[in-house]
Amino acid sequence: MTAILVNELVKRYGAFEAVKGVSFEVPAGQIFALLGRNGAGKTTTVEVLAGFQRPDGGSVRVLGLDPVADRAAVRQRTGVMVQEAGFFPDLTVAQTVDTWRDFTSAPRPREEALELAGLKEKAATRVRQLSGGEKRRLDLALALLGRPDVLFLDEPTAGMDPRARVDTWEVVRELARQGTTVLLTTHYLEEAQRLAAAMAIMDEGAVVAAGGMAETLAGLRGRVAFRLPAGVRPDDLPLPVSLDGELAVCRADDPDLAAQTLLTWAAGRGLRLAGLEVRTATLEDLFLDLPRSAR
Ligand SMILES: Nc1ncnc2c1ncn2[C@@H]1O[C@H](COP(=O)(O)OP(=O)(O)OP(=O)(O)O)[C@@H](O)[C@H]1O
């Protein structure tokens, strides 16, 4: 079943077209990442899906429903973690969760929501005293309260330390295992790669690349990087490289083979390839393959 359907979505702010005919689908239970640089239109797309904004063209469906026309039904079955949620700074974390529970039908127990979001120790802390990352955890706890079928996470781990980020990934994975559909936006490519089964990259309001994560990565070239030995010019090397500062970078379908070729060449000349790094493709490479304007 398709949980989220975006079909030729257009959204304008005045004369400015922030989303220009975007389409993608997310099957139920999948984690889907929406990527792209600042201003690409990710948040706007999420806001339309969450029913906060009305489309100017095309259509969206969440669980088969129209988020504007069927607002109440969609709200009941979705959780939204937006950027900069408004909290009351003088309430404690526990009071904030309790306040939201009052507006949520069949909410999770407070302790469960705090436990899931890793905020149990902070229950008695006032919101104003939370760190940026802890506020994001509180956002997550609130988004989870109603046991949503669909969860929209807009930059869920922004400002979190690495430990909190990994913990949050585990929460999101567990929710997906339980059948929750998750649409997340993120600037952390590693986060998208580790979490999402599929993704779309947006730029200037349009989708510039999309697909299943595993298939996309499998189709990308890997990377061999090393410091160019003194006196060696890129043209001297047996494989084409580009320069990234003092690093020579070779992109190859089979990076192990490319590394072997380069090492054999270097050994034959008594040279060392210092700092040699060989790795299979990551999402970062997909971004590097995009036109420069879209990275
Ligand atoms: N309320 C608004 N009024 C006018 N323009 C807006 C409004 N909200 C967003 N925009 C513009 O629409 C474009 C898309 O913004 P959006 O927030 O959707 O991008 P984004 O991909 O989420 O970016 P970021 O990664 O910075 O969060 C931007 O150029 C932004 O300036």
Image: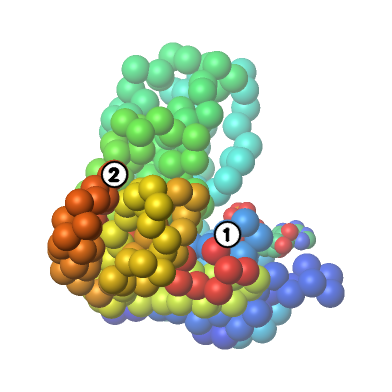
Q: Position of residue 60 (x, y in %)?
A: 53, 77
Mark 2 residue crowding within 10 angstroms, few (<14) / some (14–19) / many (20+): few
> For this rendering, which residue is in front, 28 or 241?
241
Residue that appears at 58% across and 46% down: 83
Residue 239, visible in the rendered structure? yes
Q: Secondary structure at mark 2?
A: loop
Residue 46, by quadrant, is bottom right
Pointer 2 or 1: first along the chain? 1
Residue that appears at 74% across and 74% down: 17
274 relative to 51, above or below: above
> For this rendering, which residue is in front, 114 or 239?
239
159 relative to 258, above or below: above
Q: Position of residue 202 (x, y in %)?
A: 54, 70
Q: Report the side of 253 relative to 187 (left or right).
A: left
Residue that appears at 29% across and 59% down: 224
Mark 1 is on which residue type? Answer: Arg
Query: Which numbered disc covers residue 79?
Result: none
Please name the residue that numbered disc 2 is placed on.
275
Q: Secondary structure at mark 1?
A: loop
45 relative to 91, above or below: below
Q: Is the CB–ligand 1 distance for label 1 below 8 Å? A: yes
**Which quadrant holds the C terminus?**
bottom right
Q: CA distance from mark 2 to mark 1?
A: 30 Å
Mark 2 is on which residue type? Answer: Gly
Q: Report the side of 12 relative to 206 (left or right).
A: right
Residue that appears at 17% across and 60% down: 268
Please name the residue that numbered disc 1 is placed on.
37
